Amino acid sequence: MTGEGMADQPGQSRSICPMVQGYDIEAVEQKWQRRWLEEGAYQVDNDDPRPSSYVLCMYPYPSGPAHQGHVRNYTFGDLVVRYRTMHGLAVLSPIGFDSFGLPAENAAIKTGTHPREFTEERIAELKTSLLRLGAVYDWRREIRSHDPAYIKFTQLIFLRFLQAGLAYRASAPVNWCPGCMTVLANEQVLPDGTCERSGDVVVRRDLEQWFFRITAYAEELLEALDGLQWPERVKVMQRNWIGRSEGAEFELKLRVGDQGAAGGGTRPEEAPLVRVFTTRPDTAFGMTYVVLAPEHPLVDLLTTPAQRSQVDEVRQLAATTTEIERLATAEGGAASLGKRGAFTGSFAVNPFTGGEVPVYIADYVLMSYGTGAIMGVPAEDERDFAFAQAHGLEVIRTVRPPEGWEEAGGGAYTGPGEKINSGFLNGLGVEEAKARAIEWLEERGIGSRTVNYRLRDWLVSRQRYWGCPIPVIHCPNDGIVAVPEEDLPVLAPDDVEFLPSGQSPLALHEGFVNVTCPKCGAPARRETDTMDTFVDSSWYFLRFCDPDNDHEPFSQEAARRWMPVDTYIGGIEHAILHLLYARFFTRALIDVGLASGIPREPFAHYFAQGMIRMAGEKMSKSRGNLVSPWEAYRRVGADGLRLFHLSVGPPADDVDWTEQTDQIIEGCGRFLSRVWRLVSEWTTAAGQSTRSGTLNDQDLEVRRVVHRTIRAVTEDIERWSFHTAVAHCRELVNELYQYARAKDGVHQMVFEEAQDSLLLLLAPLTPHLAAELWELRHPGQPGVHSQPWPSFDPDLVKERSVTLVVQVNGKVRDRVTVDPNIDAAEAQALALSSSKVTELLGERKPRRIVARPPHLVNVVV
RNA sequence: GCCCGGAUGGUGAAAUCGGCAAACACGAUAGACUCAAAAUCUAUUGCCCGAAAGGGCUUGCGGGUUCGAGUCCCGCUCCGGGCACCA
């Protein structure tokens, strides 16, 4: 009955070119895409009685037509949506567009097109190419972050955060990108000190900026990671980013001025104090100097006239040095440290020893971390050691280094060991000494146990037009005044000039800027900064629960109905920023009362799909190596391209796009043809050469294969092994082709069961093909996607016979087909009676026989 | 430097619990069909020796545990990613 067989028959001149004849991919796929849309098959209401599941792919930034990265992402998402729907769940599958962002504004500066127009064109392009993929969404819930309805609630959330003290304004040294003409968050600066978007070298500037107090949640964000079903490496990245470190803070008395200089010293009762943070309080006896950050407020007070010029030089250097230069000098090592630090002329008293040590400033100490001051312990800290070398400072060991340490070059020893030169800590181990040192500080009231985080507050203001305006007013009398909630949204006017000025275009728009203070009525100025687009993406998944709500961001009941997102799918590039911000936002929204009763973790399970790479490089618009899906759509359809992404390798692995890729995609098209022929030609010529009645051995075996395939595909999908799920479907198809060629013909019932099962398994993988063939087989009946997922018969899945492997000394020497219930004695007897074994053994007696029935017997001699 | 991953045929990969290494594909070779091509189908395809029968070797490298290791343990090499003056 095979395609080629039928083509042989006169009067059955079906074409042998199946991708064209009988299966017009374009037409079939369009038909089903239209139908899914019109039927609203994947629309779910909030009162849907079925148990719920929330499946979400990261909403895309609309940069134009979809590329292979999108296709990959949405193929996985769609598979899960359809699969779970077939399991009887109400699956929430929304999508929207992350439509604020710099490219639209940069285009406006270049070409004069308004960012809205630019963005909406691109949304249309992206939407078209997503619809062409046949991924199904509840389009009624579509969100665009530049939509006034969305802006309104982003602003309302901002105001609630402001009220709760979670949003605040502060002057801060910020990362300024000269290319983007705006401030960046720490997260947006790459390790080499360049902008993640434009690649320009980021410089430091002091500016008044808006922040979200994410650090208030640092501990919770860190601890809660343990309970998440996320890839371990993503959790590790977040842990590193939060960067918790435990230690102690304590204060040291200072003596201003040169030691012994007449009139230069401070009287004891006026002695100022400096607080330092250390993770190694046990090493305090080895402190030989103290270092303050160049920006530390005590620096002026401590600097003596003689040291003034040197100190100013270091401060100047620190203020103007860009991140990239600082990194370069860090690599330069000790040589540059001389210039990067200076003695202030003053001294600090080590509370542990009572001795005085010199106070330095150096740019390797950061004002924004800890207390902005450290104790210098060169013996047990590598940076301190390098600094001490450069400045000729003393080194006192407080941990006994291992044998041969000094001979091997010495230097800082940071490992464990016995405490020495440390007074009451002598003889203890490092950990115990830390605890004792902290106790000692606490008893005297000069210090305590402290935890510090690397995580900084989130800088959210951007000097840009195409973002969500920050809804506050600056009043000369009342300071910062919130825009009254009934006046939201604050919308940016359209008639602005897009100039690369480094200021928000809003700042130049008189009509926007000039307002009256809502409190006192005085003339006031509107805030002209807009929000980081990561703010929009920090709550969109909540808005999806209740997208049309016009009096609150979302109803709490709706959020409780759907949250958390059960499966979140997206690129690993968002492992830190977006995911951390969204976790913070969810907690903050709960705590300000906007989302009571929802889980504090928004994404219960996160799947990080692999990147598409070309010649080792990430595929991206900026690299200009995007591969559009249109060519593949034309040749093998959406199903063919989906099949490629599903089968090319594990979904979490990166995909290398090579010369071979086109051929693999062709191969996927070939598989679709094989399925098409297998099912369609049998359906249209039904009854031909079929049997009914008793099942023969081959019929039974085919049934077993069918049921084993159902089990395998189900298990594969459950464990996100889509590529092996596809492989199992291919095996089934190969088996059915063999069967169809059988001498005795096929058994009608067996073959129909096989075809239907195959189509059900393919429904989430190649949905158009499965739907079309199902309709062909069951005209007028409910479609394949409204069928329940197939189940397997446990009896049929059991093996009927097993291959017993016979090994001699661990090497395979024979294979025997046996009953799966064979016992150890029988297996052993069989193995020993094998001619291969007797030949090999000769005169020798087996020393030991390991029998693992029914799979293996190992004869050891 | 620190912390995570990873390394299996010509290529992408599979092997879910320590038990037949290489499923499923891509590519390649040969054949069938065809005037021919395409498409389709059939066979072969880890490497080495051998005419064959057959034998030997093989999961980055070196050790170890075990009757038995791609899988577990120890030590390396290389590749990818994250963090990196964070005291």
Image (tube, coloured by chain):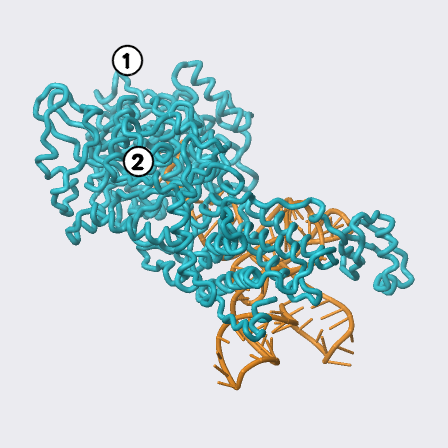
* Residue drawn at x 21%, y 42% as measured from the top left: A466
Q: Position of residue A296 (x, y in %)?
A: 27, 29
Q: Indicate which disc residue A269 carries.
A: 1
Q: Is residue A679 above or below residue A448?
A: below
Q: In the image, residue B87 lies at what x, y percent? A: 40, 31
- Please say if the residues under marks 2 and 1 sit with CB atoms less than 8 Å apart: no
> Is A63 on the left or on the right of A814, as rendered?
left
Nearer to me, A226 or A829: A829
* Subunit of label 1: A
Q: Nearer the viewer, residue A503 or A713?
A: A713
Quadrant of the rendered structure where residue A835 is?
bottom right
In percent of width and height, residue A65 lies at 32, 54
Residue drawn at 89 percent across, 63 percent down: A842
Distance between mark 2 and mark 1 Cα atoms: 50 Å
Q: Earlier in the sequence, mark 2 or mark 1?
A: 1
- Please indicate, yes or no, whether residue A482 appears anywhere in the rendered image: no
Which chain, by letter, is cyan? A
Give the residue type at disc 2. Answer: Val
Which image quadrant: the N terminus of chain A? Answer: bottom right
Q: Secondary structure at mark 2?
A: helix
* Left or right of A246 on screen, residue A276: left
Instruction: Identify the residue at image location x=40%, y=51%.
Output: A33
Q: Which residue is mark 2?
A: A535
Would residue A820 be visible to someone looking at this image? yes
Note the chain letter of the orange one. B
Q: Nearer the viewer, mark 2 or mark 1?
A: 2
Label 1 is placed on what type of residue? Glu
Residue B2 point in image, percent of width and height: 48, 42
Is A821 drawn above or below residue A560 in the view shown?
below
